[in-house]
Amino acid sequence: MQTEISKRNMSVSGKVAIVTGGSRGIGEAIAKALAEHGAKVVVASRKLEGLQQVAQSICDAGGDATAITCHAGRQEEIEALVAQTVERYGKVDILVNNAATNPYFGPLMKIEMPAWDKTFEVNTKGYFLMARAVVNHLLAREAPGSIVNVASIAGLGAARFQAVYGMTKAAVISMTQSLAAELGGTAIRVNAVAPGLVETKFASALLQNPEAVKRMEATSPVRRIGQPDDIAGLALFLASDASNFITGQTIVADGGSRGR
């Protein structure tokens, strides 16, 4: 006899997902993982060229993906992204908030306000506006859904030389908890992933020093830097029904470094 727990798996077949920041790195890996497990995927970011390559690679592999440009800090573009997704696929079930920026790397006291404002606009305001647009759609359908916010271990403690980025990610973690609590009776789940150092273009400022990388690898319990696929599997789990008793959580994926 098949039990309820045995029926649950990592399949997201029949579901529609939006992945922001989907043109490369962690976002690309998550989009491909969702598509491989049955979801129709909309990848979004500011520039179309990289998105088209990701969408095409998903389609070439037998999946279904569409590229739509969207500035993650602009409300009108976010609302248009959700509307275009619904127009193409009929609904949205999954949101992966991944688009982020980190224009300043240096001492907190020396940051200039345009860099501060841009970081909060994309990393915090953008996440909220995306979540609100998808939640409103789900509530109108009276449908369950899953929101996965890509945060960072920088939001869980001191973030030397990237403090403002860390502040935005701390806000994302708080927002995840509050949204999950407020939406608890609606079958809309909200969780976050907090990656450690992952080998992407976004993390290039931290990875350009080979000696520093060697030290980080040597002190990590898994003895390596993270890869985008390491985060994609966790995001897939949180998007799927396999995690349907999990909400309001921030799951750290850093190879065990914070536990040392």
Image: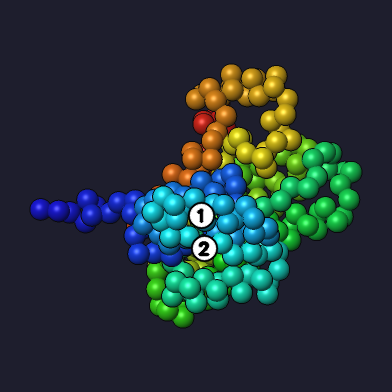
Residue closer to the observer: 21 or 185: 21
The residue at the point 51 percent across, 31 percent down is 255
Residue farthest toward the left in the current orientation of the protein: 1
Residue 100: percent from left, percent from top: 67, 52
Q: Nearer the viewer, residue 200 or 158?
A: 200
The three-letter amino acid code for the residue at tag 2 is Thr
The residues bearing labels 1 and 2 have C-alpha atoms spaced at a distance of: 8 Å
Amino acid found under the numbered disc labelled 1:
Gln
Within 10 angstroms of label 1, few (less than 14), some, or many (20 or more) residues? Answer: some
- Is 124 on the left-hand or right-hand side of 218? right
23 relative position to 64: left or right: right
Mark 2: secondary structure: strand
Identity of the residue drawn at 55% across and 76% down: 83
Q: Which residue is the site of mark 1?
A: 56
Tell me how many marks there are. Answer: 2
Query: Residue 169: percent from the left, percent from the top?
Result: 65, 50
Label ID, residue 196: none
Residue 172 visible here: no
Work out whether mark 1 precedes mark 2 in sequence or the reverse, and give the earlier one.
Answer: 1
Q: Above or below — where is 30 with respect to 105?
A: below
The residue closer to the viewer here, 108 or 58, is 58
Q: Residue at x 34, y 51 (%)?
A: 10
User: Residue 66: which disc?
Assistant: 2
Secondary structure under badge 1?
A: helix
Q: In this orientation, does residue 53 appear? A: yes
Are there few (<14), some (14-19), or many (20+) residues within 10 Å of tag 2? many
Q: Compared with residue 84, is residue 253 higher up or lower down, i.e. above or below?
A: above
